[in-house]
Image: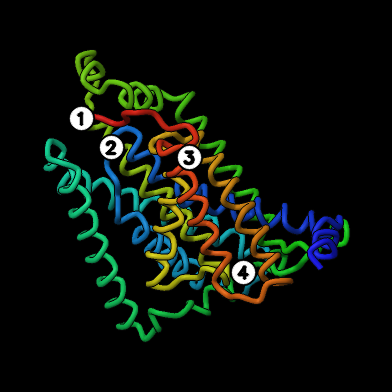
Amino acid sequence: MFIDALVEFLSPGNVVDVLVRGLAEAGLYVMIASGLTLVFGLMGVLNFAHGSITMIGAHLGGLVLVTLAAGGTTVTGLLGFAVAIVVAFGVLAALGAGIETQLVRRIYDRPPLYQILLTFGVALVLDELARIVILFYGLQPSTVWQAVLGTKPTVLRESVDIFGASIGGLELFQILFGVLTVAGVHLFLTQTRYGLFIRAGSEDSEMLSALGVDVRRVFTVVFALGTGIAGAAGVLLAWDPAWGASVPLAAETLLPAFVVVIVGGLGTFRGTVVAALLVGFVDSTMTWWFQNHINFTGLPEMMVFLVLVVMLIVKPQGLYGVSEVGGH
């Protein structure tokens, strides 16, 4: 029986389907986790409000999409998505800058427990504020916002046939968006002045300050960039029925984000990209097996955390982690 299932799994159509779905999931994971990696890489701050930022980005982007792209046509949908990305990134980057300057900055010299408690408290406040606003406008906070799903462009609703596998347009779009995110963050880190400051600060922030660089401003920019990316990722998640815009999205995105960051190695963007690919392929592979040959719900999600457990046992610092990262 196992041999027959393995032969079925290795058929060209199934292999292509698993690979594409794995890449699509990796694209989502890398978008969700990139901001978390940037913030910890330089500042050493584990931002537990990261998932809440993503959730707010999904609702904020959803509001723009419902306003501008209610018809769901290709042109209006894509234009609305572009506007939603800009709005979500800008608003949440500003929110992130405010959180860093008014809250996080005050506890840099204190033990990490203070940062964890503070960002966890911020997450609770943001979640409840979002719940209040959503209830005020008559939306159900615990289920997916259906009106946003209706703004998905026609081209993303259709499927294409590749070697016998039916691949959704949204999955290809997620792959494209993930690649653009990786390329954008990589170019920012390697080709810009602030990228140079970030890489230098992650190694020795005191020396960077001694060279005349305003490290506090760099911290603010990084925190703003990290929250902005998280908000932009939320806009894309609002179109995916597996995620969707809802208040529980905060917890649903925070957990895999931490899995990817820890597996890749805390504070390393390269590790985040590799870990996102690894987790994405494990998730898509195990989902196929559990949907087709093993009737047990919930196990595909559990396998993602099994990857984390194995990594912590085999290599606790992660794939590309170092002994120390971040500093003030």
Using the numbered discs, state the Cα–Cα distance from disc 3 to disc 1 in whole angstroms: 30 Å
Which residue is the extreme one toward the bottom? Answer: 138
Marks 2 & 1, CB-CB < 8 Å contact:
yes
Using the numbered discs, state the Cα–Cα distance from disc 4 to disc 3 in whole angstroms: 42 Å
Q: Which residue is mark 4?
A: 152
Q: Residues within 10 Å of mark 2 (few under 14, many from 20)?
A: many
Q: Which residue is mark 2?
A: 44
Q: Nearer the viewer, residue 21 or 77?
A: 21
Q: Residues within 10 Å of mark 1 (few under 14, many from 20)?
A: some
Tell me the tag on residue 314: 3
N-term mark: 4 or 2: 2
N-term mark: 1 or 4: 4
Is residue 135 visible in the rendered structure shown here? yes
N-term mark: 3 or 2: 2
Mark nearest the camera among 4 and 3 is: 3
Q: Which residue is mark 1?
A: 328
